[in-house]
Structures are given as structure tokens and as C-alpha cells.
Image (tube, rainbow, N blue to C red):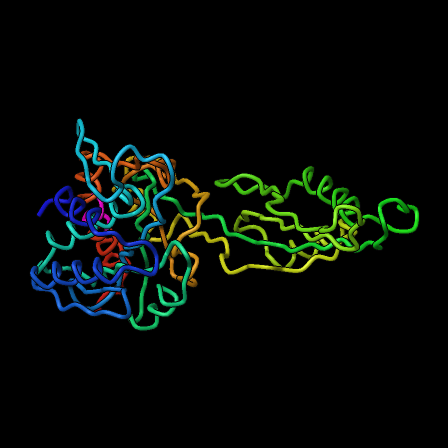
């Protein structure tokens, strides 16, 4: 079964986050038909090829975001047109998943110098606790990981995180006709918002600078009253050289508003360029250099495992109407994942002490 054929089947099964039961069952049955012993936890599926160490996690996610406005046809009906397959999740990330599965099929029964833990997770788009976060301890020890996301097969060894701050400006309520008796919290918040608009934090070599973005403001109610409080939310897409708690403290020192951390779960990630998995991905990929990824992914929950995010497709097509991937990208992706695994095991074999 080719990656194109697999992808057609995957796109035709709706799988928004939290509703992956059908697609998980399909993937499990497919892997079993190739001779794999399949494991399942909630709607997460995994199986192994090879035996012994080192152990390489090959991770993709089965869920999608809900369809957005603007689709020219049914998002769940895969359509081929001039070598492009259009459908919800075709690019993010059922295309990369189909390449993982095609690689698993090709490598079934192959004698490998290690173990590939093929893993298809649920609820990646929502970061639910029933996804990779809870699954990881069940997979056994892992020496390295590939996270299958659309990167044009360019290996990303750095990924942005996400820090959300809730900031509250405290004023003093008063009737609008007696404004001199109070302090308008919205006005106070606007001063801090203006400060945030000019802030830029230390740049990362692959990801660039971090700039705060105010993404929501809550204040006021009665139109003839000055509000005594105004809360605004700040989204920071952080880089591996920035610590979330330190960054929140620095921002709090610059603002008059009260600052508290609202969400910090998605930590930025990075992998040393000389790690065997990074070198294996660079060797097998299109590019001659490493890149950074501005989007978050399940990598955020893999702890200190050396990881590379890489896969076929283009991140700029994700979460958009008429999302697509090409047949050429799928064919290259299936071969790529096989090459990375074999190269990684070869590098690790050379590193092993004599006599082992």
C-alpha cells in the first residue's frame, strides 16, 4: 500500500481531536495486517519494528483541527488534482503519518540494528492528557525521536514554546460623569499594552526573536461606569534560550499591571546539532542546514529525548481551507523516514564500544 493510498483512507475518516476512535482502529488493523503486534491506549496506537537498542520513536498524530471556513468541497473527501491531494489533515499531519505507515510496511520483518517505535498519537492539536503525555511512559526507554510534522523534509532542531500571561490593571471605579474621582483601569491597561508592543526579547539563532502579542482584553461592562479592573492576555511564542518563569518576572518588572502565568505547558525545545538523530535527519533530508519550527507539537512533551521535527508537506498549508500535499512529497517522505532510521542505527553502531 503506497503512502498516497494510505492518505486517501486517513483523510476520509474524520478525526477531530477527541474523536479519533475510528482512525485509531483503522491504523491498528492496518499495522496488524503487516504482521505487527499492535498496542493501544485510548486512541493512541503503537507498534515496534526490530529489536534491542537503540530505540527510536517515530511519532505522528492522528487528529486534526475542525474544518475552517472557505473549503471549496467536502473537507473529508480526498480529491486528487494534478498530483495534489486536498483534504482536511492531508498536510497536518495525516500526510506525514501516511509516510510513517508506508515506512513501517516496507520495514516489516526487516532485521534492524535497533528498534523503531512507530507511534500514532491522539489529541495533539489540543494537548490533552490522554495523548502523548500519558502514553510516553508506556513506550519503554527511548534514545531518540522523530516528530512527523510538515517541514518540507528540512530537519528542525528547535521549536518555539508558548507562554501565556494574564495581566490585570487595577484602577478605581467611578461614574463616567465624575471621572476625576476614579482611575480608569482600561486606560491603565492600555499604557502597559503599549509598552508590550515595543518589547523584543533575545533572539535565537534558528527561531529569531520573541515578541509579546496581546490577544485578548476584558474590562468594563456598564457603559457609563469607569472600570476598576481590566485584564489582558499576552501570548509569547518563546525560544529555547528563554526561561518561562524568568521571562514572566522580567515582564512583570516593566508593567504596572499585576502579571501572573496563565499557561506555560508548551516549553520551547532544542536538540544539539551533533546528536546522532540530528545528523541522520540532515543526511537523509533535502536541506543542507537545520531549521527552526515556529509551531508547537508533541515534541513539547518528550522531555529530554534528543528529537528532530521533520516531515513532508509545508507548515504554511496547515489549518487552512483546501489543505493539500503532493504525491511527490509523500513518496519522498516514506523513503526519508526509512533512511533516517537506518542511518541513525548505523551511527549508533559506530559509537558503540568494541565488544558490545
Q: How many marks?
A: 0
Q: Predominant secondary structure in magenta?
A: helix
Instruction: Please indicate whether residue 344 sits to the left or right of residue 27 in the image.
Output: right
**Residue 160 or 325: which is nearer the viewer?**
325
Nearest to the observer: residue 178 or residue 12: 178
Please indicate whether residue 57 sits to the left or right of residue 221 in the image: left
For the residue pair 293 and 241, the one nearer the viewer reads as 293
Relative to 17, does residue 154 appear above or below in the rendering?
A: above
On the image, the x and y values in percent for residue 212 come to 62, 44
> What residue do we see at 20% from left, 63% from top?
115
The quarter holding residue 264 reads bottom right
Quadrant showing the C terminus: bottom left
Does the magenta-highlighted stretch encompass residue 37? no
In the image, which residues are magenta? 336-340
Q: Residue at x 92, y 46 (%)?
A: 180
Q: Nearer the viewer, residue 104 or 73?
A: 73
Residue 225: % across, % down:
80, 49
Residue at 17 percent across and 39 percent down: it is: 331
Name the spot of residue 94 as percent of width and height, x first.
25, 48
| 338 is within the stretch colored magenta | yes
The part of the image, by quadrant, that contains residue 123 is: bottom left
Query: x, y (%) of residue 235?
Result: 58, 48
Amino acid at each position: 500500500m503506497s503512502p498516497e493510498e494510505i492518505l486517501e483512507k486517513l483523510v476520509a475518516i474524520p478525526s477531530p481531536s477527541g474523536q479519533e476512535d475510528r482512525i485509531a482502529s483503522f491504523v491498528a488493523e492496518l499495522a496488524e495486517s503487516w504482521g505487527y503486534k499492535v498496542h493501544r491506549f485510548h486512541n493512541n496506537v503503537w507498534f515496534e519494528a526490530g529489536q534491542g537498542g537503540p530505540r527510536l520513536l517515530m511519532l505522528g498524530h492522528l487528529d486534526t483541527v475542525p474544518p475552517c471556513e472557505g473549503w471549496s468541497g467536502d473537507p473529508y473527501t480526498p480529491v486528487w488534482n494534478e498530483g495534489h491531494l486536498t483534504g482536511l489533515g492531508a498536510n497536518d499531519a495525516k500526510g506525514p503519518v501516511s509516510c510513517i505507515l508506508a515506512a513501517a510496511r516496507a520495514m516489516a520483518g526487516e532485521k534492524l540494528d535497533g528498534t523503531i517505535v512507530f507511534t500514532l498519537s491522539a489529541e495533539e492539536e489540543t494537548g490533552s492528557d490522554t495523548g502523548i503525555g500519558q502514553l510516553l511512559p508506556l513506550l519503554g526507554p527511548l534514545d531518540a525521536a522523530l516528530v512527523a510534522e510538515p517541514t518540507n523534509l528540512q530537519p528542525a532542531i528547535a521549536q518555539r514554546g508558548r507562554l501565556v500571561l494574564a495581566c490585570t490593571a487595577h484602577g478605581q471605579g467611578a461614574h463616567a460623569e465624575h471621572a476625576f474621582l476614579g482611575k480608569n483601569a482600561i486606560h491603565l491597561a492600555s499604557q502597559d499594552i503599549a509598552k508590550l508592543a515595543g518589547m523584543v526579547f533575545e533572539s535565537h539563532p534558528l527561531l529569531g526573536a520573541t515578541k509579546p502579542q496581546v490577544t485578548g482584553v476584558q474590562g468594563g461592562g456598564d457603559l457609563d461606569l469607569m472600570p476598576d479592573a481590566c485584564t489582558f492576555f499576552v501570548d509569547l511564542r518563546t525560544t529555547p534560550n528563554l526561561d518561562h518563569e524568568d521571562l514572566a518576572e522580567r515582564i512583570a518588572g516593566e508593567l504596572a499591571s499585576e502579571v501572573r502565568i496563565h499557561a506555560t505547558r508548551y516549553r520551547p525545545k532544542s536538540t544539539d546539532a551533533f546528536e546522532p538523530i540530528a545528523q541522520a535527519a540532515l543526511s537523509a533530508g533535502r536541506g543542507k542546514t537545520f531549521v527552526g519550527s515556529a509551531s508547537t507539537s508533541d515534541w513539547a512533551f518528550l522531555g529530554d529525548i534528543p528529537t528532530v521535527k521533520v516531515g513532508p508537506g509545508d507548515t504554511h498549508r496547515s489549518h487552512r481551507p483546501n489543505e493539500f500535499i503532493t504525491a511527490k512529497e509523500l513518496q519522498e517522505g516514506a523513503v526519508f523516514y526509512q533512511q533516517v532510521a537506518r542511518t541513525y542505527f548505523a551511527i549508533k553502531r559506530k559509537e558503540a564500544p568494541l565488544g558490545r
